[in-house]
Image (tube, grey):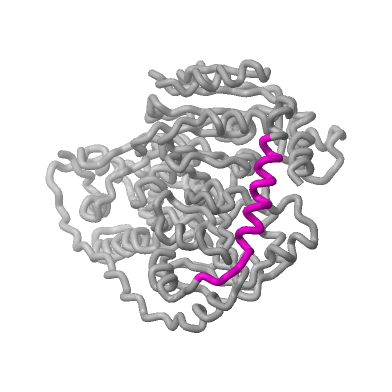
Amino acid sequence: MKYSTKLLSQSLTQICLLKGVTYIVISPGSRNAPLTIGFVENENFNCFSIVDERCAAFFALGMAQQLKLPVVLLCTSGSALLNYYPAIAEAFYSDIPLVVISADRPKELINIGDGQTIQQENVFANHILYNANCKDGNENLTYNENEINQAFNIAFEQQGPVHINIPFAEPLYDTVDELKVHPTIIPLNSPEKKASIELDPFVDKWNASRKKIILIGALAPNSIEQKFIDQLANDESVVVFTETTSNVHHHNIFHSIDLLIAPLEEEGFKKLQPEILITFGGMVVSKKIKAFLRNYSPGEYWHIDSKKAFDTYFCLKHHFKMTPNEFFNEFLQQTIEAESTFQKDWLKVKQHRLNRQALYESSMPYSDYKVFSEIMKSLPNNIQLQLSNSATIRYSQLFKLDKSISVFCNRGTSGIDGCTSTAIGAAYVSKNPTVFITGDLSFFYDSNALWNNYIPYNFKIIVINNGGGGIFRILPGDKNSEKFKTYFETKHHLTAEHLCKMYDFDYHSVSVENELKDSLNSFFKEPNTPKLLETFTPSEINDKVLLDYFKFIK
């Protein structure tokens, strides 16, 4: 086995192995050669080579999303590192562990006009959990090993991104056959024993309330014990709101928030206004629920999360610093079900909305909504569903999915920039077939994601191509001006066909309704190669069909 002559390279790779971090995503370069050698020459590492650093970062993010373990990103010096930033911000807000390792010039070569140099230390300052700024020279080995240990431990313990910046002086490519270092491993901190919480005041408020809302944001599948969901969903005084990305299921929950509240007026909002609001999980997609809870504040608002609590609705009263399972295990044992018609009344509204939705869908024209409706009905069970942002994630909220489908979306920053790359990284480590649904702008924005040698054979993409940023047609503004079409909607005539030829995807397209169902049925049959289905929809009516839907279900 070969090792770099740089002792710091040997230390870092050994620490990775001893910490159990074996997935390494590498972008090519020269300054990072000592670490590239250390990783690729050791068969215990699973190494991936991806040229585009932005795509590489989101690919690693997708893997870490599924593994729930740190994945290493490695790049050369200079602007290469900055291309990691969108994925780092997403990891920061979505609690996904990434270990970003950047090679750097020695300090004396910074800010003197040397090539591929920028100020790399602390470059991600506001969106990183820890910055380990290593020092050049073997005399600093102990300091550097402590910093590296600290970074890895924080990535594990706090589930988020960390940055290790490592300066290397030339020569960079020399190797030896014998390991020269045996770094000390600093173990992870033992989980702190949770202090006993005085729940009595909260239990009393809960038991006295007749109108409670549980709002669940983005969660990985099986995060919450089903017995807690069952107990909450069977309580007459509780309305449980979830989203597609919540991965929570029960026949009494309200799986489509906008379906219920979009048509409401002041009287309806007052009836729905909760006395107690409890939230947990990640970011919430629905703007309508945010507007409702900000305008009709609950008397009590509690958030449950072991790490952080955002005051999303501007009325947070208490943050329970524990996992939802820990909280409900203690809390629900002490509660009683209050007599109330709160849930029953809103379940009637829900059923009315669902009946109206089915009636609307039976006669609506070919459009984005029609395509999403047919896709959601056609999805196979036991798949991983990856969704891009913008219109895609919003349309998906309107439909109930089978509980065997695991749903993911980059909702930390809600950007379109790396959705395809994330989906491919997640698909690579997932045991289930993966379907990725995306809009045209999101897909073309991240088209370098397909420049990837690790795409599984059972990976499928559906692109809804409406010729631009269709979501902007739903928002206020003059939609018929050329400036709108150019600077907001960004009209185009691109298709995915030639990209599929270049990257060896099986390509199919649909542009009329009578072909849609048959195309979807054949698309979901077991493939021998990655597939892409592109549906072309009429941008001029998509917004009207959706807005008419919300009017109709009222």
In this picture, residue 243 sits left or right of residue 109: right
In this picture, residue 445 sits left or right of residue 404: right
User: Is residue 392 at least partly visible in the picture?
Assistant: yes
Was residue 190 drawn as part of the magenta stretch in this picture?
A: no
Tell me what residue is drawn at x 65 percent, y 16 percent.
514
- Residue 511 placed where, x, y %? 66, 18
Give 460 or 406, whichever is nearer the viewer.
Answer: 406
Where, by quadrant of the figure, is residue 346 drawn?
bottom right
- Residue 54 placed where, x, y %? 50, 41
Total tally of numbered discs in the picture: 0
Tell me what residue is drawn at x 41 percent, y 80 percent.
197
Please identify the dominant SS of the magenta region: helix
Tell me what residue is drawn at x 37 percent, y 44 percent.
31
Give 409 or 78, whichever is nearer the viewer.
Answer: 409
Tell me what residue is drawn at x 67 percent, y 29 percent.
370
- Residue 502 placed where, x, y %? 50, 18
In magenta, the rendered stretch is: 337-358
Give 433 or 156, whichever is nearer the viewer.
Answer: 433
User: Is residue 125 at least partly visible in the picture?
Assistant: no
Give 57 or 245, whichever is nearer the viewer.
Answer: 245
Was residue 352 drawn as part of the magenta stretch in this picture?
A: yes
In this picture, residue 176 sits left or right of residue 223: left
Where's the N terminus, which quadrant? top left
- Residue 381 placed where, x, y %? 44, 34
